[in-house]
Amino acid sequence: MSYATRAPSVLVTVLVLVATLWVPMPAAAADQPTASFEQDITTVTRGDVVEIRVRHSAPGVLHVGGDDYGYHLAVELTGAGVTTVTIDTYNSTGSPDSYVSGGGNKTLHTAELERPLEPTTYLMNVTIDGVERAIGQLNVQPRGNTSASTAVAPASLTDEETTPSVENIRAASTQRTVVASGDIAVIHLNESGLESALAAGNAAGGPAANGIEISMNQLEVRPNHEQQTFLATPENGATVVTDFETDDVYIVWDTSDIPLEGDRETYEVTVTLQGEHNALVDEDTITARTPVTLVEPTVSMDVINETIYPWEALTVNVTGGTSLAPGTVLELRARAPGQPFLRLVPMTVTENGTVATNLTFAPEDRGLVFPVWIREYEDETKTTMTFHEADASLRFVDQETDGTFVTISEVNLSVGGFVQVETPDEEPLGTSVSLPPGTHENVVVKFDRRQLADSELLAVAYADRNRDGNFSPAVDLAFRENSSVNGSLIADDAMVRLEPDAKTPTPSPTATPTETPETGDQTAETTANTTPYPVVERTPLEPAVAGTNTGIPFSPALAVLALVVTGLLARRRATEEP
């Protein structure tokens, strides 16, 4: 058989084979309606509100439950897109229009419930044109225990007229049960199934509060007294703030009007579900409790360096403790009466109940005496600050002695110190006993070695820097003008002539103390170790002309010597100030 004759039969065979293998394909899936649940299993606690989200490409019906569950809810899904259906499981009694929102018509195919929706796992499905297009589950869980805890927040949390936000409450709260009267007691509830019942923010019990009663109850009832109980109402200083997304409820309670008898009063905050008005329980049930211990607001303050001497830095360290809530801002006040001097410094209470700050003052503040206290707690915290300045003066007049002592007519010291007498060569002859602050007359300086000839001597005022009452040249530096390192020494010179018949010194009266400008009290140093000062039993020679040390005529040689010695003051320089 030729190829031409066989070709048609081969072609027919191929076509038959192709026809045998070809199967008609159905219409594309996109041509059919679709539906799906955002979550295959949606979970809610009995008593809370649940949202069910359904995506559908055509109108349909959402079914929850069925006849076997004793509850069958049908909700129309209109149009196409995403429909959110919300069910309030606490208020699920009565018509579904009263507790279901979202979607179209709501139909209950079973009898209306008499109690909130019972805990179980309910079947859910979506039908479009009577065909089931999606399946899911609604898991209604039993209520758990509501937990409660106590925290404290500063009184400023409720200073604003608006209700504080959840974020502000959390940021301001410190976990503890002790609350100073006037601060905010923050009762934190981790609620379970109370979302709908608390939605109105009413926790005073009764039908209006859905049977939820939150109260603060006195624990220690005194004889012949009734227990004091305060409902969580605005009239009693309480505000309910909720965050149902996290199941958190906060009772922000201003304790200003909660009675405090004595230094401490113990209360307990309870959360009660009233059986008569709350559908979740059959009888009154306390679901949570937490203690609140009310105490007196106390503030203490300690100024570590309340007295500052001229050689010390003008820095004041203030510390203290308080029962007030952490985060409370206290105002430290420093004010000098009669002076344009006022310092206001904020101090924030730490988590462990302490406050601290450092104050730095200016050089021109030296010499001030002023009180420091914490505003609103002046009686407990008032402290007097004393900033000593390096101020001194002395008067050393020409005189006659037996070479074993001299008498300084007058010494005035702002802080305790000494007077040292030196030769023209700056060699010390003797030092006075310790002199407290104040004015001293006829101070005798006994020499450690005898003066051998008539000489111009120099008296120099020194500050007792370490306040030990003993003169130490390495520590106790000379007073200088304007408290300056380069300032002139506070000193005076006098011609001292030898007189063998000069009588030995005898004790002198106690010096005149310096008075504190604000209180009139004597400076503390004048009362410690006061020692009588000996004087020579004769009147010191006064200068012939006011303001000079020329009580008696100088010989020409002595006059030249006096001019040389007087120049010592200009040549001396020290490297430290008192």
Image (cartoon, rainbow, N blue to C red):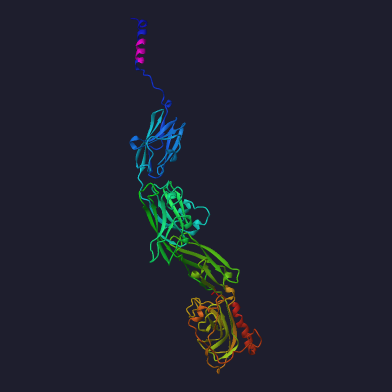
Residue 253's spot in the image, x, y percent?
Answer: 46, 57
In this orientation, which residue lies closer to the viewer: 220 or 128? 220
Q: Is residue 337 above or below residue 42?
A: below
Residue 12 counted in the magenta span: yes
In this orientation, which residue lies closer to the viewer: 106 or 499? 106
Q: Is residue 520 above or below residue 351?
A: below
Q: Is residue 24 visible?
A: yes
Residue 551 occupies which quadrant of the picture?
A: bottom right
The number of numbered discs placed on residues in the rendered structure image is 0
In this orientation, which residue lies closer to the viewer: 334 or 97? 97
Residue 289 occupies which quadrant of the picture?
A: bottom left
Residue 15's spot in the image, x, y percent?
Answer: 37, 13
Residue at point 52%, 57% (across, down): 159
Q: Residue furthest bottom?
A: 501
Quadrant of image for the C terminus = bottom right
Residue 336's spot in the image, x, y percent?
Answer: 57, 70
Q: Main secondary structure of the magenta part?
A: helix
Quadrant of image for the N terminus = top left
In this orientation, which residue lies closer to the viewer: 452 or 295? 295
Q: Is residue 424 visible?
A: no
Residue 552's spot in the image, x, y percent?
Answer: 63, 90
Q: Is residue 38 above or below residue 345?
A: above
Residue 407 counted in the magenta span: no
Which residues are drawn in magenta?
Answer: 11-19
